[in-house]
């Protein structure tokens, strides 16, 4: 027969566990922190991670090491983070794919909400519909007309099937009835390289990564995906302004930790990340690159993710958007 432990023993065990967690939090951090970026090096996710990670490193007094683990539309790196020890030494940089994947990929090896502890949103930004100068279009309407005249023959670049540069084009195609062919790459960096070379003539990309190439006229900005113009590209219209009523797509980035990370460590990370985002040099860099710094509470980030998952699940189902290979 099993005997229940005396209440005093249980109470003592709880005190010991709480003391251990408190001591862990008080000593945190005492070694380098890993920032998993579930995408290939060179894209916007990488840029945002390194920018925020460098300032977080200054605030924490420990190195923040970016670890790129691309593949499977971010699912590989995300699963690695979900299975990591919840000790505050492995963090995951997430973007809008985190909200899109549950709708697009069906069964995932992790639960976007149950397996992670939100820390803070970092920034938001529209994407840019950009074309190579060799493509004979200078506006969204001209692109739509060209695609209609060449159904299924116009290729566009994406950072991966179901990614934040694939879904905006699928949304545009769904609304306008055009048909273009996606060319999927393993990350934003490789996709941008082929867009710059003209190997693929058009595609959505982030302001952060494409802005220098627009300014140097290596690429042409046709429109931005948000409902208001970007401060970094005030002369570039929105897609809705360009005659596609109701169109909106806004990207975002944030940081999460594995679930069950001690609340005291989550708070420490949140406070130092928000402080990093408030630094004038970081705010200027983010603004110059066409994004808006956020710095939200963990609770606000969870609510934001819940709403975004619901939004994209609805869009995918109602629009009948299909993703190749998923």
Image (cartoon, rainbow, N blue to C red):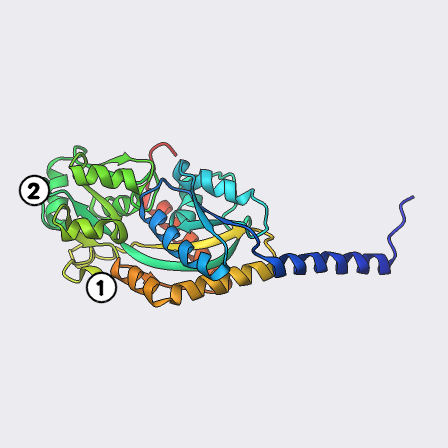
Image position, residue 72 (x, y; %): 41, 36
> What is the distance, in whole Å, between disc 2 and disc 1 at their CAs?
27 Å
The quadrant of the picture occupied by the C terminus is top left
In front: 54, or 184?
A: 54
Residue highlighted by disc 1: 231
Give the x, y percent position of residue 109: 51, 38
Where in the figure is residue 130, as x and y percent of width and height? 18, 47
Q: Residue furthest right?
A: 1
Q: Hey, which residue is sitting farthest left in the picture?
A: 136
Residue pictured at 52% horizontal, 46% vertical: 111
- Mark 2 = which residue? 136
Look at the numbered disc 2 and give the secondary structure of its residue: loop
Please state, as top left, top right, bottom left or bottom right, where the N terminus lies in the image. Answer: top right
Whether tag 2 and tag 1 are in contact, CB under 8 A, the answer is no
Element on which disc 1 rests: helix
With 189 as the anchor, is 135 left or right in this view? left
Mark 2 vs mark 1: which is more N-terminal?
Answer: 2
Within 10 Å of disc 2 (Cα), the crowding (few <14, some 14-19, many 20+) is few
The reply, left or right, for residue 174 in relation to residue 262 is left
Relative depth, front residue between 51 and 257: 51
Number of other residues with Cα within 10 Å of mark 1, as a class: few under 14, some 14 to 19, many 20 or more: some
Residue positioned 27% across, 43% down in the render: 170
Q: Nearer the viewer, mark 2 or mark 1?
A: 1
Q: Is residue 45 above or below residue 23?
A: above
Q: Is residue 287 visible?
A: yes
The residue depicted at 36 percent of the width and 40 percent of the height is 40
Note whether 123 is above or below 109 in the view shown. below
Say which of 38 and 225 sits in front.
38
Q: Residue at x 67, y 59 (%)?
A: 23
Residue 249: which numbered mark, if any? none
Residue 249 position in % (x across, y down):
30, 54
298, above or below 200, in the image: below
């Amino acid at each position: 027969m099993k005997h229940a432990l005396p209440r005093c023993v249980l109470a003592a065990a709880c005190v010991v566990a709480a003391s251990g967690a408190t001591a862990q939090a008080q000593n945190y951090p005492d070694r380098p922190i890993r920032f998993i970026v579930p995408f290939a090096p060179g894209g916007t996710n990488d840029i945002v991670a390194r920018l925020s990670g460098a300032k977080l490193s200054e605030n924490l007094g420990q190195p923040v090491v970016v670890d790129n683990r691309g593949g499977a539309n971010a699912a590989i790196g995300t699963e690695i983070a979900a299975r990591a020890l919840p000790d505050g030494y492995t963090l995951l940089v997430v973007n809008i794919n985190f909200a899109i994947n549950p709708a697009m990929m069906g069964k995932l090896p992790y639960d976007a909400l149950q397996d992670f502890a939100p820390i803070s949103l970092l920034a938001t930004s529209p994407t840019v519909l950009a074309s190579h100068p060799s493509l004979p279009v200078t506006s969204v309407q001209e692109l739509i007309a060209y695609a209609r005249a060449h159904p299924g023959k116009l290729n566009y670049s994406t950072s991966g099937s179901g990614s934040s540069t694939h879904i905006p084009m699928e949304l545009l195609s769904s609304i306008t009835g055009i048909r273009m062919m996606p060319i999927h790459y393993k990350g934003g960096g490789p996709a941008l390289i082929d867009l710059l070379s003209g190997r693929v003539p058009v595609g959505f990309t982030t302001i952060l990564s494409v802005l220098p190439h627009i300014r140097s006229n290596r690429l042409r900005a046709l429109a931005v995906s948000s409902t208001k113009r970007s401060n970094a590209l005030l002369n570039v219209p929105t897609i809705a302004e360009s005659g596609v009523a109701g169109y909106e797509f806004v990207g975002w980035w944030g940081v999460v930790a594995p679930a069950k990370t001690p609340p005291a460590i989550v708070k420490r990370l949140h406070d130092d990340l928000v402080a990093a985002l408030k630094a004038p040099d970081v705010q200027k860099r983010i603004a110059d690159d066409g994004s808006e710094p956020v710095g939200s509470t963990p609770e606000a980030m969870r609510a934001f993710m819940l709403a975004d998952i619901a939004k994209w699940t609805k869009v995918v189902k109602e629009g009948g958007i299909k993703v190749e290979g998923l």
